[in-house]
Each structure stands twice: as C-alpha cells, then as structure tokens.
Image (cartoon, rainbow, N blue to C red):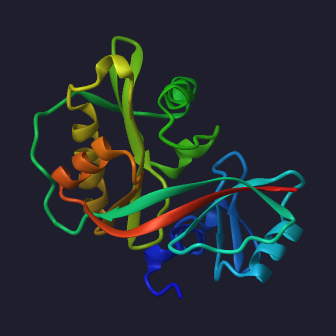
Amino acid sequence: MMEHILDNPIYNALISAHSIFSRGTDDVKYYLEDVASFAGLKDNSRYDFETLYENSPKESLFIVFTPDPINIPDQWRIVTHIDMFQMIYESKKVPGGAYIDFRDLDESHVPEMTALVELTKPGPFNSRTIELGNYTGVFNGKDLIAMAGHRFNPTPFTEISAVCTHPDYFGKGYAYELICEQIRRILAKSETPFLHVRNDNHGAVKLYKKLGFYIRTEMIVYVIKKS
C-alpha cells in the first residue's frame, strides 16, 4: 500500500504540478512522449497496467517507479529493472560551498544536453524534457561539461535529476555546486528536494549524503514495452 506521496512520485506529479504534460485516464497517467517516458499508475494494479496498454500509443515504452515488486501483465515486456534509492532533503538551509559560474539552460542548449546525457547515462532525456524546468549547466568555453535540473514535481516535492559531469571534468566539485543551486531553487518555492539514484552508484550516494540527503526508501524502476 502506497501511503506517502513519494511512494508514487510519477502519478502524483502528473495529477498536480505536471498535469499540463499528462495524458491517460484518472487513475493511469503518462507524460507526453517528447517530454518524458514515465508512466504513473494510481495503484500499480493489473487493471492499471491493462488500462495503460489500452490507452497509450502503439509500441509505447514506459518507465514505472514502485517501492515494492509488482506483477506486470504479459502484454508488457519487461525490458529491464533497476534498483534505486529514493533520497530526500529535509533541511531548510542550502549546503555551503565554493561558487562556480553556471548558466541557466534553454531550448538552444538541448543538443549539447542530449550529448552529455548520452555520454554519462544519468537517465532518460527527451527533446522537451527541459520544459520540466530549472536546468543549469557549467561550460568550458562553449562546451557544456556539467548540468542538473528538475524532473518530477509531486507537490510539495521537487526532484533533482539529470545530474551529470563530463568524465574529463570529474573531481572539480561541479555536481556538488549544481545540486546546491537546485536545492536553493526548490527551497525558494517552499518545496522539499528529493532525488533517485542507483543503489550501486556508491560515489553518488556518498555525495548526496554529504549534501544532507538521506535514504527515505528503496525503489524499483521497471522499463516496460508493449509486446
């Protein structure tokens, strides 16, 4: 039973702040395809998955988050599943650190953002994902070398996502500083930051704990495609 709003972050985002990006039914929601590949189901029940199948475009691929293992009907092929931690930041103060020169990113930066995501694999990034908001980046000359932004927004929580740094620039503190800026922006909205990270990404988990995040729960991510 999902009792906390963050037990079902995608569905709760799509019925609140992200309703403008939502398609589906009252109980089964998914993002516009060019915005994101995520689906949120109210109960993650067999009926919900069948409804998603019937109401989504042909050959759809979706990413579903759940705090517990679920049985997915046979009309969906499970492409993969990933074990994650969901981490939350409950302090009202922004962590301190050295200032870096970052820029707000816009649609003109999408090709560079896509290339950085493809190189570093922080998670999916579609042509309109930037519309989810507050993407900031670090540049070396004209080259984008690090970035972070917002993704799910199940009010009153905002997820920090797409945290990535070009491998040639590891160890310079760019991810730390970009996350601090994202925390600052979320707190300025009187919301609470949270994020998801693979549970085997020990370096990232260590960084997030250093920033003040704690593990709220384990999450399972299923990538499913219409059979």
| The quadrant where residue 77 appears | bottom right
The picture places residue 66, in percent across and down from the top left corner, at: 55, 70
Query: Residue at coordinates 39% horizontally, 60% vertically from top-left?
Result: 85
Looking at the image, residue 220 sits to the left or right of residue 160; the answer is right
Above or below — where is 163 with respect to 33?
above
- Of residues 50 and 157, the one drawn nearer to the viewer in this rendering: 50
Query: Residue at coordinates 23% horizontally, 46% vertically from top-left?
Result: 207
Above or below — where is 18 with respect to 201?
below
Looking at the image, residue 74 sits to the left or right of residue 126; the answer is right
What is the total number of numbered labels drawn onto the structure image? 0
- Of residues 83 and 19, the one drawn nearer to the viewer in this rendering: 83
Query: Residue at coordinates 77% horizontally, 73% vertically from top-left?
Result: 49
Query: Residue at coordinates 42% horizontally, 67% vertically from top-left?
Result: 218
Q: Quadrant of the C terminus?
A: bottom right
- Of residues 120 and 77, the one drawn nearer to the viewer in this rendering: 77
| The quadrant where residue 226 appears | bottom right
Residue sticking out furthest to the top: 141
| The quadrant where residue 16 appears | bottom right
Residue 134 visible, this orientation: no
The picture places residue 92, in percent across and down from the top left corner, at: 16, 66
Looking at the image, residue 54 sits to the left or right of residue 225; the answer is right
Above or below — where is 168 with respect to 18?
above
The picture places residue 116, in percent across and down from the top left corner, at: 49, 26
The picture places residue 89, in percent across and down from the top left corner, at: 25, 64
Looking at the image, residue 192 sits to the left or right of residue 44; the answer is left
Residue 84 visible, this orientation: yes
